[in-house]
Image: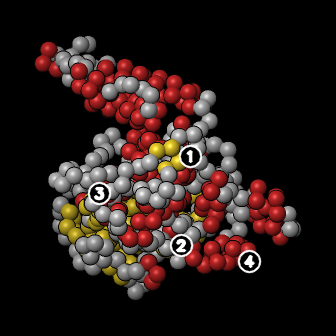
Amino acid sequence: MLPQPEQRGRIPPIHQGIAQNGARVFRSYSRFGRDSGVNLDTDLRRLKFTPFLGIRVSVVGWLCFTALLVTAAHQHSPRNELPDTTADRVTGVGWWPTKSPASTKVYVGSDACVDCHSTIDSAQSESEMAKAAFRLSGGAAGQPAPGDFKSGSYTYRFISNNALPGYSLEVSSNGQSNSYPISWTMGLGAHGQTYLLDGNGGMYESQASSFTFIHRVGLSPGHKPLEEGSVENALGIPLKSGDALRCFACHTTASSANSTLNTADAVPGVHCEACHGPGMDHVKAAIAGQKVQARQAIFNPASLTPTSSIDFCGACHRTTMDVILNEPEPGAFTIRFQPYRLEESRCWQTTKDARLACTQCHNPHAPMVRDAHFYDQKCLSCHSLRKDAKHVVSSGAWTVTPKICPKATANCASCHMPKSYVPEMNSTFVDHFIRIVRPGAPVPN
C-alpha cells in the first residue's frame, strides 16, 4: 500500500535509520580510503527521499565498503588498513580484549607475572585500569555520593545496612520503598561510578550513579527517567547476558569462559591477562626456560599496526566502527569514546602514523599523566622545527613536514584537544579529536 499523499517523500523511521547508518558507513570508509571522490554530504542533500531510499543507500554503502576492503587487502601498507568492529576482532584468530576463552583454567593471575615482570606489575597495579571495578561498595571502592536524587515520582539514595556489607540503592515513591544491595562498583571514580545490584534473582545496572564532578547522585548514563510504576522495577535495568559479559570484560579480568559469565572468579580491574591473554602456556614455557615458546604463547599488543592498535584499545573505549554502527545519532557525548574521536582527526586520517596511536601517549602499565605539559613532547615529535622531526608515515614511503603552531610551543593539548562537558556524565572529558578549535565553534560530532 502506497503512503497517503501527505506522507509521500517522508522516510519511515526504520528506513531513515538504515539510510543514516548506510550513509555514515559509506562516508567513513570513503574517508579512510581517501580515493572515493564522492561528496556524500552534498549528494545526499540533493536526493529526494522515498520510502525505499534508505535501503538503497544502505546497499550502496555496504557495496562501497566491501570494495574498499578488497582494495585494502591488496595494499599491504598500514596506511591502507581500515578500522573494524570489536565483534569482528573478537571472532578472529588470537587474543583480543573482551574475548572469552574456552576455560577460565587458562588464566594464572597477575601474581604469576611478578617473578619476571615485577616493575611493570607494580606500576600497573596503581593504574586507573587496575581499579576499574570493585566488589561491593565502600572500602577501596569509596562511599557512594551522599544525598537524594529525584527522577519523576521516584527518589533515590544510597543507604548502609548493618545486616549487609557495603551499601544498597533505595528507591521510594508514593509511600512505597525498596532496595537492592550493591554487588559491584564499576569505575574508578575519576568521573563517576555506576553500580551493579543483586535483586529478584538477577543483576541490575543501577538507575542512579555517583558523579564525582558534581559530588552527588544522578541518573546513570544511558538510562531514561521512568514513568509511574513499581518501585521494584525502578531500581535499575536488568542486565542481559550479552551486556553483562561486555560490562565485566571491560572492568574485570578472567570473568568468563565459553561466553558464560562467572563473577565468582572475576578479578576486579583490568590486569595483565585482560590485554595479553590467558597466561598459562606462557608461564609454563617461561618456567621451563623455553624463551621462544614463551613469547609465542602470549599476546604482545606492541606488534599491532597503528590502526589495529587503536581498535585494540577501542574494544572497551569504542572503535570508530563500533560508534558508526551502534550510535544512530552521534553527538558531543562521543567525546567519551577516545579511539573514535582520535580517528576523526585530520592528522590521523592523512597519515595513520604510529606516533598517534593510543599507547604512544598513554602507558597502559602506569597511572595516567594528567598534566597537559607532559604531552608536548608527543606533539613536538612531529610538529617541530627540528630537522630530525620529519613526519614519516608508517609505510615509510611518504613524508611531509607538518605545520608549526603559530600561537604557542607548550601545552598543545589544552588548545587542540580541549576539555568539553558531557551532560549525561556530569563531567568534562578531554576531546581526542585533534583540531584547530575556532572560538565559538560547536563541538563536532
Quadrant housing residue 105: bottom right
Give the numbered dot on residue 406. Answer: 3
Q: Are marks 2 and 4 in contact (CB under 8 Å)?
A: no
Q: Residue furthest front?
A: 387
Between 91 and 395, the one lying in front of the other is 395
Which type of secondary structure does the marked residue at label 3 adopt?
Answer: loop
Q: What residue is disc 1 on?
A: 394
Mark 4 → mark 3, Cα distance in angstroms: 50 Å
- The earlier-in-sequence mark between 2 and 4 is 4
Which type of secondary structure does the marked residue at label 1 adopt?
Answer: loop
Name the front one of labels 3 and 1: 3
Q: Label 4 amino acid?
A: Asp
Residue plotted at (69% across, 74% down): 117
Mark 1 → mark 4, Cα distance in angstroms: 35 Å
Name the front one of labels 1 and 2: 1
Q: Residue furthest bottom?
A: 162
